[in-house]
Amino acid sequence: MEDFYRELIIERYKTPHYQGVLDPNDISYEDDNPACGDHIQIDIRLDENGVVTEALFSGEGCAISQASADLLVESIIGKNTEEIKALGKEDVLDNLGIELGPVRLKCALLPLKVLKAGIYGLGDQKAED
């Protein structure tokens, strides 16, 4: 079974399904992992109820970070911002389906960090309006 997930990671790295830039967007956030050079940006469009209608990622990095971003972006389409706020480390690891050491774990979790920062940043902007 682990071989299946390794193949999934390589496939999503080589031919991501949700890679690109959304302009205009409702949420856009980017960050990097300076230890390894991975860089991820996630762009999101929301409907009037705060449900993700479109999402894409862009960036560069290792197979784990890029596949994790692709799978995470796919998983949030159709979710509202509260559901996204509830996502955690285990959701990312379940998407990838393999055990990761501490260094690779940071690569896998970078997209979640970017996603959460973008979502929580939106909440801060709404509170100021």
Image: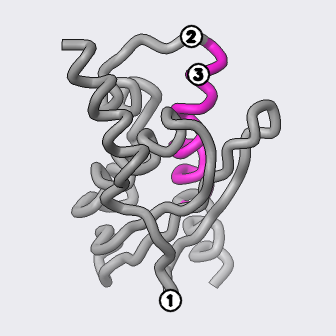
Residue 105, magenta (yes or no): yes
Q: Residue at x 35, y 28 (%)?
A: 96
Type of amino acid at the residue the image marks with label 2: Gly
Q: Earlier in the sequence, mark 1 or mark 3?
A: 1
Instruction: Calculate the distance from the C-alpha at mark 1 to the C-alpha at mark 3.
Output: 32 Å
- What kind of colouring is applied to the model shown? one colour
Residue corresponding to mark 2 = 101
Residue corresponding to mark 3 = 104
Residue corresponding to mark 1 = 24
Q: Residues within 10 Å of mark 1 (few under 14, many from 20)?
A: few
Q: Position of residue 39 (x, y in %)?
A: 67, 50
Q: Position of residue 22 (x, y in %)?
A: 47, 79
Please tell me in which quadrant of the rendered image residue 106 appears.
Answer: top right
Mark carried by residue 60: none
SS category of the residue bearing label 1: loop
Residue sitting nearer the eye, 82 or 35: 35
Of circles 1 and 3, which is in front? 3
Q: Relative to residue 10, is residue 7 drawn left or right?
A: left
Q: Position of residue 92 (x, y in %)?
A: 40, 32
Type of amino acid at the residue the image marks with label 3: Arg
Of circles 1 and 2, which is in front? 2
SS category of the residue bearing label 2: loop
Determine the main secondary structure of the stretch shown in magenta: helix
Start-end of magenta stretch: 102-118
Whether 90 is drawn above or below 68: the answer is above
Type of amino acid at the residue the image marks with label 1: Pro
Q: Earlier in the sequence, mark 1 or mark 2?
A: 1
Q: Position of residue 101 (x, y in %)?
A: 56, 10
User: Do callouts 3 and 2 mark residues in contact (Cβ within 8 Å)?
Assistant: yes
Q: Residues within 10 Å of mark 3 (few under 14, many from 20)?
A: some
Q: Residue at x 33, y 50 (%)?
A: 83
SS category of the residue bearing label 3: helix
